[in-house]
Image (tube, rainbow, N blue to C red):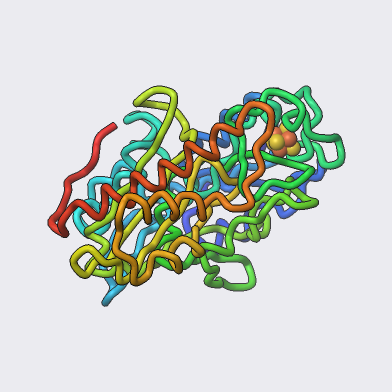
Amino acid sequence: MIPFTYNAPGSIDEAVATVDPMGPAGQGGAFLAGGTTMLDLMKLTVVSPPSLTDIQKLGLDEIVQEGDQVHLGARVTMAQAAEHPLLRDGAPVLSEALWKAASPQLRNVATLGGNVLQRTRCPYFRDNVSPCNKREPGSGCAAIGGINRLLAVLGTSENCIASYAGDFANALILFDAVVETERPDGGRDIAFDALHLLPQDHPERETVLEDDELITGFRLTVPEWARRSRYIKVRDRESYAFALTSAAVALDMDGDTVREARVAVGGAATVPWRAEAVEDFLAGQALTEEVAMEAGRIAFEGAQGYEHNAFKIPLGQRTVAKALLDVAAIDQTPTGGGSE
Ligand code: SF4
């Protein structure tokens, strides 16, 4: 690990004033929350921030209901959120996305703010040797012609096909969430679906956040009918594995007919991926197996498969279809905390 400066400020103002916007190696300082991604990447020297600003003294660790909205502090842990009744009972898709990620040990320390910013698991990004436009802009992409089984088929560019590795973000995006941030010159709200950037020509730039911008929390509106929701995750093993494909679904139903659908796809896209064309297609439809399969097909329109990951397209289509049918089959009573 390359030496760095460690700071542990006692206030948000101090924290955003402390973090270095740009260090000598062209990398800015970084905030440290749970550290479950950051410290790994520092040990691998994939990233080498000149300073870490630890936010553990800043609070930001509560979940509260504010009118018709739920507020999640950025330092709420994954385990804490997964077990909270506002998520577990009010929107099981959020709780399940958290329970089905990582391991119990990681969920006890990883925070929601860090989780939505977790980096890709593309092996070429992490090996620190191969050409990788995300790690070293302009160097090329070893994955496009290499081993790309786990990488993305939606939202890719000729410069990067890295898949977004998280689960929670794919559920959060269903609820028009807002990201609250602070900077030295003041805070702002960012629509969650505008937080992550497609790789396009600059895969090294993953979000709209500035170097000295700290996520302090999230606000989301959870409708009563979100009790009817699920997160389906397909992976190589049933625990401690990243998604090959996943689907986050919430349905407002009138009998067998969809009044409103919220659908997102994970494991197969470069960013958290809300499937709005699917939502438009489903509104007013009776949710039969045939309609669910067509919804899955629509979710992957425009997808581009590569040598080893083209299987994700039919698998993802069926994942969306299964999630829709599973959600349509449940009533709106609480479903519990999910399982690993
Ligand atoms: Fe790097 Fe992206 Fe290519 Fe992976 S897919 S090697 S992260 S540029």
- Out of 285 and 47, give the one closest to the viewer: 285
Viewer-closest of 324 and 188: 324
Q: From the viewer's perspective, tell me whether residue 2 is left or right of residue 83.
A: right
Whole-percent x, y for residue 36 in the image: 49, 34
Where 205 sits versus 262, above or below?
above
Residue 314 screen position, x and y as percent: 51, 38
x and y, in percent, of residue 154 in the image: 61, 47
State whether residue 182 is above or below residue 145: below
Q: Quadrant of residue 42?
A: top right
Badge count: 0
> Which image quarter: residue 41?
top right
Tell me the quadrant of the picture where the N terminus can be found: top right
Is residue 177 shown to the viewer in this render? no
Taking the spot 43% from the left edge, 29% from the top edge, the residue there is 235
Left/right placement of residue 283 relative to residue 44 reads left
Residue found at x 57% / y 36%:
38
Q: Of all residues shown, which one is farthest toward the right?
A: 138
Q: Nearer the viewer, residue 4 or 316?
A: 316
Q: Residue furthest left?
A: 333
- From this viewpoint, is residue 283 visible? yes
Residue sitting at x 86%, y 40%: 138
Outermost residue toward the bottom?
Answer: 67
Q: Is residue 305 above or below residue 13?
A: above
**Picture quadrant of ligand 1:** top right
Query: Which quarter of the rendering shows the C terminus?
Result: top left
| Residue 168: image location, x then y, percent | 41, 48
Task: Residue at 32% x, 59% y: name it.
Answer: 250
